[in-house]
Amino acid sequence: MKLLGNIIWFIFVGLWAAIGYVFLGLLLCITVIGIPFGIQLFKMVSLVITPFGQVVDTNFGKHPIINIIWLIFAGIETALGFLVVGLLFCVTVIGIPFGMQCFKLAKLTLIPFGAALK
């Protein structure tokens, strides 16, 4: 079931989100200040491509200051976007598993520094 979910997710959501994350990560890596943020976007690409079967472990205490900076400038907006898309997926019974993956991505994009995939 994970394989089928990941294939469907990759075709309709994952590929496009991964392209966007890689593009934004490259733009952020142009400046020295943006490199840590770009690296976090590259880290998120693996989860965005195939989220089924992966678990996100967030650790806010590992890098609290940079997580707050991320939260102010990018985290809230991105997490709200994933929450809205997740709620739209959850309207139908078939979309509930995809909505749950969006909620997982919202958790990761809210506080990415110190997060790890299990």
Image: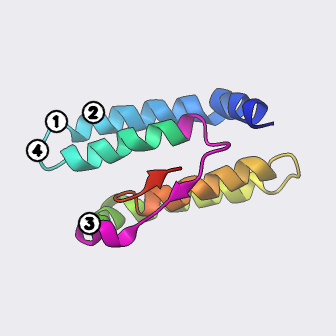
For the residue marked with disc 1, what is the amino acid?
Answer: Ile
The residue that mark 2 highlights is 26
Amino acid marked by disc 3: Ile
- Is 22 covered by the magenta stretch? no
- Residue lying at 63% horizontally and 30% vertically, measured from the top left: 10
Residue that mark 1 sits on: 30
Look at the numbered disc 1 and give the secondary structure of its residue. loop
- Part of the protein shown in magenta: 48-65
Q: Of marks 3 and 4, which one's residue comes earlier in the chain?
A: 4
Q: Which residue is mark 3?
A: 69
Q: Amino acid at mark 2?
A: Leu
Residue shown at 13%/50% (left/top)?
A: 33
Identified at 43% across, 35% down, the residue is: 20
Q: Earlier in the sequence, mark 1 or mark 3?
A: 1
**Helix, strand or loop for disc 2:** helix
Q: Is residue 101 above or below residue 73?
A: above
Please give left or right for residue 99 compared with residue 13 in the image: right
